[in-house]
Structures are given as C-alpha cells and as structure tokens.
C-alpha cells in the first residue's frame, strides 16, 4: 500500500477567520492518520483539529495571530511519522506538533522531536513510558495499563464473574501486542485472576476459528481482547458462534463508538474502557454535535460520536493555545527555536480544562491524568457502565 506522504498545507477551510491577516500566523504541524491500518480510528482527528483551529482563529487567534496548520498523513507508518516531525520542524517553521497518533509512531517520532527541540503532543498513543525519557514529548491520553486496571476494578465492584480469563490479540499491531503480552498479564496476576498463554492472530487473518477454539478449551469466564475494531469484530463473532457466553473485555484500543456495527449483535455485553464519554455533560454533547455535523460535511457519515482520540485531538489544540499564550508565542521565523522551548516550559505545571476533563494536569513524565469510562455494549449501542475520576498529579 502506498503511504500518502501528502503534505496538506492547510487552514481550517471555511472554519478559519478571514479577518486575521495572512502574514500574522503561527504554524502548527498535524501528524495524522488518514490511511493504513489505523485509518478507522484516526481519520477524524483532522476534523477535530480543524474545528479547534477554526474556533480559535474566529475568536482572535493566539496572541493576535492566526494559526495555520501544516498536515502530514503518515499512512499509519512510524517511519513517516518521523519524516513528518522533521518536515514540520525544518521546512514549515512549526512551533509545535499535534501528534503523532499512535504508540508505534510516537516511539519513532519522539526522539526526532527531542533532537530538533519541538513539542509533540500525541493524541492517542497509550503505551506506558513513551514520554519518560524526553522533555519535548507530551501526551493528552491515558495509558492502556491504567485504563484496563480500571476495567478490572469495575468487574469486581459490579460483581461480574471473572475468576478465569484468557487473552487474545493481534500480534502485528504494536500496542495490541504490548497490551496483551505485558499489561494484561501483569494486571490479571495482580488481581489473582488465572489465565493461560495469550493466543495471537495477525491483522489480516481471515479465519480466527482455530485461535478461538484454543481459547475456549480453557473454559474462561472473560476473554481479554487486544485488537483494532475490525479485528475485535472477527473475534467476537467467532466466540459467539462457538458458544461463548461470558464477557469480552478490552482496553481503549478498540473503544470506538462508531465501530459498534463491526461487532454486530455478538458484541452485546462487551465491556471496554474509554478516555472520553460523549454524554457526560453539556460541553461534551455540544462537541459531539459539532463533530457529527462537520464529519457529515466531509463525507465521513459513519463518524457520528467522537472516539476518545478525537476528543483528545480537539483538546490538544486548545492545550497548545494556552501554552502559546503563556509563552508569548509569535511564530516569527527568527524566534521559532526559542519559542518552541518556551512552549515546552509553559506546559510544565499547566492545568487545562476541555471536553476530556476539568483541571487536567500532567505527571512527571508529561502524561495527562484523565478520567476513565467503562462502556458496555447494550442493544448495539454504547452505554455507560462505570466511571473513574482522574488521578491527581504530584
């Protein structure tokens, strides 16, 4: 598959405010996924970033200057994410980057951004520890281990039978592999829930019947799944076809409210954890309406409810706006290097309120502390099952 290394030097289209002069601009890079294996959960990131930029520009911009976006579709390829970081920093004079999208991309792009001295804020990467060794790498997301731990806590306090578990996962998708071979086993052991050797399948596997048969021979009460939405759908259908009546559980990897149709009726009762709940309050509902309307205009008719990474992308723009205002960012080429560092420094100790949560803080490793929401698939729709408040920052 050809990766679209299309650089979409762009404004937010009709969303941008024409009153701000073209010469008074602050450039942000957007490292996004509009093709490749992560297209389904990632393609509406652009919608959310454009929405936020348009709103900010319409309200007067940042320090009186308009935001201009430079965009790069990585095609879900970590190598292209590194290329995007280099281009934004060296060619576009961007002061900061929204993205990369995934954990695999962030693992490759974060070291590049550190060398070039430019802040990157990942909107979806959830592998623990990705930001720990860098000062310019930030994440407005929660890690998979923490979120799955919340789900296991919810099983216990809601009296869901879970005394025996098994694990299935996609082996050739980075975060699915790490989640199933590291985080799931560690968290299940910590709660004294026995499980067997995790069973894998590949992203393009058509028939998962042999793997499901192997799982069900161990008689689990819950199956912990680590997969993309389409992969999860395959496993769900086969589990039910072979007679599994227990709960399928999973972390936020496939927590996409627009993918419920991929699960079909076989997804009934599945429990997953998400970093965003669209019906939480008036602010999240208003954002959801804007999201659905703008996606409809763009032909993304299936994108009606925001994925947690969509909400995190929208909030990332406002987070950077707050940091740029604190740093006095101008976007002037002669000052770009110093302003990039000033944005990094302005993010330290910041408190941020957006659609993802109120008074959000960042821990010592520059990861956001966000709430968690346990979602149950009921009548082929998302239903709030349980919720957790954000952890506090030291």
Image: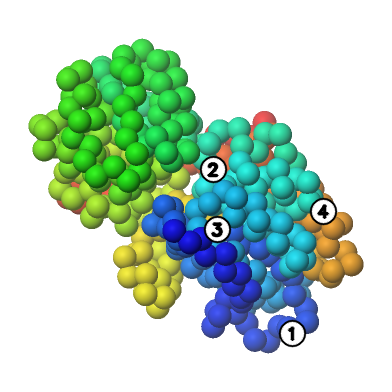
**Location of mark 1 (residue):** 21
**Mark 2 crowd level (few <14, some 14–19, many ≥20, 10 Å Cα):** many
Q: CA distance from mark 3 to mark 2?
A: 13 Å
Q: CA distance from mark 1 to mark 3?
A: 30 Å
**Is the C terminus in the top left, top right, bottom left or bottom right quadrant?**
top right
Q: CA distance from mark 1 to mark 4?
A: 24 Å
**Location of mark 4 (residue):** 342
Q: Is residue 234 left or right of residue 56?
A: left
Instruction: Give the vertical position of 210 relative to 45 (above or below).
Output: above
Write down the quadrant of residue 191 in the picture. Answer: top left
Which element is circle 4 on? helix
Please say if the residues under marks 3 and 2 sit with CB atoms less than 8 Å apart: no
Q: Nearer the viewer, residue 335 or 360?
A: 335
Which element is circle 3 on? loop
Which element is circle 2 on? helix
Q: Position of residue 290 (x, y in %)?
A: 43, 70
Q: Nearer the viewer, residue 394 or 233?
A: 233
Q: Position of residue 190 (x, y in %)?
A: 43, 15
Q: Which residue occupies 73% across, 83% down?
A: 22
Instruction: Give the vertical position of 183 relative to 264 (above or below).
Output: above
Q: Nearer the viewer, mark 3 or mark 2?
A: 3
Q: Is residue 122 visible?
A: no
Q: Is residue 199 visible?
A: yes
**Location of mark 3 (residue):** 74
Q: In terms of sequence position, does the residue under pointer 3 or pointer 4 come before the other?
A: 3
**Location of mark 2 (residue):** 103
Q: In terms of sequence position, does the residue under pointer 2 or pointer 1 come before the other?
A: 1
Which element is circle 1 on? loop
Instruction: Give the vertical position of 374 relative to 53 (above or below).
Output: above
Q: In terms of sequence position, does the residue under pointer 3 or pointer 2 come before the other?
A: 3
Q: Nearer the viewer, mark 4 or mark 2?
A: 2
Q: In terms of sequence position, does the residue under pointer 1 or pointer 4 come before the other?
A: 1
């Amino acid at each position: 598959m050809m990766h679209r290394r299309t650089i979409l030097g762009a404004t937010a289209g009709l969303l941008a405010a024409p009153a701000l002069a073209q010469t008074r601009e602050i450039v942000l890079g957007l490292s996004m996924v509009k093709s490749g294996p992560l297209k389904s959960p990632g393609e509406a990131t652009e919608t959310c970033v454009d929405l936020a930029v348009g709103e900010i520009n319409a309200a007067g911009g940042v320090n009186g200057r308009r935001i201009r976006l430079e965009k790069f579709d990585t095609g879900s390829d970590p190598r292209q994410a590194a290329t995007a970081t280099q281009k934004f920093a060296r060619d576009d004079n961007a002061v900061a980057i929204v993205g990369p999208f995934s954990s695999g991309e962030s693992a490759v792009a974060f070291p590049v951004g550190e060398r070039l001295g430019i802040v990157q804020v990942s909107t979806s990467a959830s592998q623990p520890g990705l930001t720990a060794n860098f000062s310019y790498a930030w994440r407005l997301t929660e890690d998979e281990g923490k979120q799955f731990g919340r789900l296991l806590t919810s099983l216990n306090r809601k009296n869901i039978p879970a005394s025996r578990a098994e694990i299935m996962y996609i082996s050739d998708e980075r975060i699915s592999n790490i989640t199933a071979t590291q985080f799931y086993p560690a968290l299940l052991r910590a709660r004294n829930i026995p499980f067997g050797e995790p069973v894998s399948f590949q992203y393009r596997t058509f028939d998962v019947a042999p793997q499901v048969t192997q799982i069900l021979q161990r008689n689990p009460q819950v199956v912990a799944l680590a997969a993309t939405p389409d992969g999860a759908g395959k496993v769900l259908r086969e589990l039910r076809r072979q007679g599994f009546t227990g709960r399928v559980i999973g972390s936020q990897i496939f927590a996409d409210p627009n993918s419920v149709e991929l699960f079909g009726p076989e997804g009934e009762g599945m429990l997953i954890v998400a970093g965003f709940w669209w019906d939480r309050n008036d602010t999240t509902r208003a954002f959801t309406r804007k999201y659905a309307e703008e996606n409809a205009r763009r032909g993304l008719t299936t994108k009606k409810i925001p994925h947690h990474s969509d909400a995190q992308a929208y909030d990332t723009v406002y987070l950077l706006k707050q940091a740029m205002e604190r740093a006095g960012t101008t976007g002037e080429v002669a000052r770009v290097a110093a302003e990039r560092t000033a944005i990094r420094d302005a993010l330290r100790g910041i408190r941020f309120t957006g659609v993802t949560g109120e008074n959000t803080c960042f821990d010592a490793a520059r990861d956001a502390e966000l709430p968690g929401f346990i979602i149950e698939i009921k009548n082929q729709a998302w239903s709030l099952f349980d919720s957790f408040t954000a952890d506090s920052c030291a």
